Image (cartoon, rainbow, N blue to C red):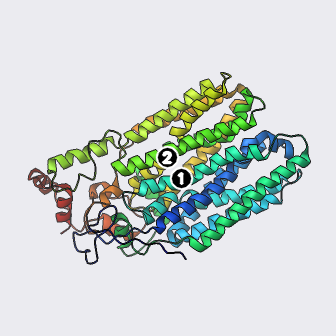
């Protein structure tokens, strides 16, 4: 295997750890960042790209594939929806496998199935073999289950506290880039011609190219992808690894996450937003061709615009969260100040409460703007000006798909120290359920009442999601754990009790041996002792 390594950074903190011997009571554990982390996240991003490309490659040329295989438009829609259907029953065993076997096994299975599905499709290039192409797409849909839940886990296992949101955004970026290329390339390679022999030739080019890329990426995963770094990258990860694995109940873990009301609301709102994105992407060809006949290429370019704008939004959201370390566009302070002995306790408390109280503002603003973008797209699609559609589609994509990594990272914060695979799996489970529902409902509305009715249906749900998002109470647990606090410290125990059960590994991190009384905490605060110092004393 290739080996890339950086020396540990002195002094601990988000970016690195102290030198050896620093692990004492009240001292941060050793952490180290490896250059290899960038190879891991970009390799994952690449095979996620290939899988996402295969998801939308049929839908954006729906009318051409429908003619080639002589099937109904709704049947072609199922080539996209099979990804959603495959995800729903399989995500739970896959998440269990991720917790048990780790990243490398999941990466090998996901990239391997993606490669197999691509080669099966090559055998389906004949007008009477639609069943074979559907089977190949189903295999790719199963591969997707091993891919979608990994961004948050890769970010936590390999990246420092100041990098996790950016790393998650890069991982999601690959999936979005795959959808973008899926919108752009198939209409270029497969033209709308009546000669079935010509169509066979062009579809073969598309499928062989996809299979070659999928095979190369599978080989690279075998050679390069590593389970985890030798030394953890952050205090939060080090605290989890420092505890012995005791009893583990995956079912109990899921039940505890569902009981976590802020996370449960996020599951609903994330599902609405992402399900809307899936439905719009699947039905985009139908919507554009309804108002602009013969514009298959521009339908693909509009889809490309949605996704590219969303990728920009994803990166900006990820960088914003890493720079501010809050989910608040207007916060006056955050965890960087909390734990600084130079800041008085009353000021620390005010800053922390401000961060928690306002921490959903970023998600609320982005969600509201996604709703606004959908409404604007709805009422400009039929104006007869393609440049207007490109403009409003870009606005829609920037906020709708820009929300995806933000939702992943918000979920990881709300559920720490639970497995990121479990939390992101539940988020994606919700997205698949809403994706199937919205795609079928919007497609039927478009067929019977037109594109405006179908898009208003999506807009109403996005508005409901905006309202629910505004009610989510933030509890940014991972940020608290990344303060300079030892694993024996009570890190915000009042916020963490009764949530963690992925492993009893973490129970000793959540449950303090002896809680400091609230009266004594208040007295210390009045004396000007800042939060992290009080928490360290509470653990002694």
Q: Locate residue 219: give its quadrant.
A: bottom right
Closer to the camera in the image, 400 or 426? 400
Mark identifier at residue 92: none
- Residue 239 visible in the picture: yes
Quadrant where the C terminus lies? Answer: bottom left
Mark 1 or mark 2, which is nearer the start of the sequence? 1
Question: Residue 419 location in percent, x, y?
Answer: 45, 62
CB atoms of marks 2 and 1 within 8 Å? yes
Q: Residues within 10 Å of mark 1 (few under 14, many from 20)?
A: many
Look at the numbered disc 2 and give the secondary structure of its residue.
helix
Closer to the camera in the image, 445 or 28? 28
Q: Residues within 10 Å of mark 2 (few under 14, many from 20)?
A: many
- Residue that mark 2 sits on: 314
Instruction: Name the residue: 70% across, 32% down.
Output: 288
* C-alpha separation, residue under disc 2 versus residue under disc 1: 8 Å
- Residue 456 visible in the picture: no
Instruction: Name the residue: 34% across, 44% down.
Output: 359
Left or right for 400, reference 437: left
Question: Residue 522 location in percent, x, y?
Answer: 13, 52
Instruction: Name the residue: 49% across, 46% down.
Output: 314
- Residue that mark 1 sits on: 172
Closer to the camera in the image, 268 or 81? 81
Closer to the camera in the image, 249 or 532? 532
Question: Residue 94 location in percent, x, y?
Answer: 58, 64
Q: Is residue 378 above or below residue 281?
A: above
Left or right for 252, reference 451: left
Look at the numbered disc 1 and give the secondary structure of its residue.
helix
């Amino acid at each position: 295997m290739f080996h890339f390594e950086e020396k540990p950074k002195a002094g601990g903190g988000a970016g690195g750890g102290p030198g050896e011997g620093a692990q004492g009571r009240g001292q941060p554990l050793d952490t180290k960042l490896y250059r290899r982390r960038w190879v891991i996240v970009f390799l994952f991003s690449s095979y996620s790209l290939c899988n996402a490309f295969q998801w939308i490659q049929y839908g954006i040329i729906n009318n051409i594939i429908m003619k080639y295989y002589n099937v109904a438009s709704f049947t072609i829609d199922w080539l996209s929806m099979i990804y959603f259907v495959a995800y729903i029953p399989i995500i739970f065993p896959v998440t269990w496998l991720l917790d048990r076997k780790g990243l490398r096994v999941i990466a090998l299975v996901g990239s391997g199935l993606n490669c197999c599905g691509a080669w099966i499709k090559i055998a389906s290039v004949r007008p009477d073999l639609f069943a074979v192409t559907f089977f190949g797409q189903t295999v790719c849909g199963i591969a997707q289950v091993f891919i979608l839940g990994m961004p948050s886990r890769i970010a936590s296992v390999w990246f420092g506290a100041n990098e996790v949101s950016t790393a998650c955004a890069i991982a999601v970026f690959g999936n979005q880039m795959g959808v973008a290329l899926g919108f752009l390339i198939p209409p270029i390679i497969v033209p709308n011609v009546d000669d079935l022999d010509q169509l066979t030739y062009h579809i073969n080019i598309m499928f062989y190219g996809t299979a070659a890329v999928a095979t190369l990426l599978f080989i690279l995963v075998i050679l390069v992808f590593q389970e985890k770094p030798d030394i953890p990258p952050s205090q939060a990860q080090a605290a989890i690894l420092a505890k012995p694995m005791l009893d583990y109940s995956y079912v109990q873990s899921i039940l505890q996450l569902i009981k976590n009301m802020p996370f449960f609301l996020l599951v609903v709102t994330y599902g609405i937003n992402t399900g809307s994105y899936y439905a719009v992407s699947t039905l985009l060809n139908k919507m554009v061709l309804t108002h602009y006949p013969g514009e298959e290429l521009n339908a693909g370019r509009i889809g490309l615009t949605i996704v590219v704008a969303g990728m920009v939004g994803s990166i900006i959201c990820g960088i914003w969260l890493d720079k501010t370390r809050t989910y608040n566009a207007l916060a006056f302070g955050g965890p960087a100040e909390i734990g600084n002995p130079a800041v008085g306790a009353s000021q620390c408390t005010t800053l922390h409460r401000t961060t928690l109280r306002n921490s959903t503002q970023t998600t609320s603003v982005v969600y509201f703007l996604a709703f606004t973008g959908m409404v604007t797209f709805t009422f400009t699609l039929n104006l007869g000006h393609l440049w207007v559609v490109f403009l409003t589609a870009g606005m829609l994509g920037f906020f709708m798909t820009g929300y995806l990594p933000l939702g992943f990272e918000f979920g990881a914060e709300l559920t720490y120290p639970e497995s990121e695979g479990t939390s992101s799996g539940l988020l994606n489970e919700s997205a698949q359920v809403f994706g199937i529902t919205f795609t079928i409902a919007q497609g039927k509305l478009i067929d019977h009442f037109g594109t405006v009715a179908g898009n208003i249906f999506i807009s109403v749900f996005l508005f409901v999601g905006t309202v629910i998002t505004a009610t989510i109470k933030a509890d940014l647990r991972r940020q608290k754990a990344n303060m300079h606090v030892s694993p024996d410290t009570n890190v915000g125990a009042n916020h963490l009790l009764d949530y963690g059960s992925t492993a009893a590994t973490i129970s000793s991190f959540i449950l303090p041996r002896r809680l400091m009384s609230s009266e004594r905490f208040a007295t210390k605060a009045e004396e000007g002792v800042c939060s992290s110092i009080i928490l360290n004393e509470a653990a002694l």
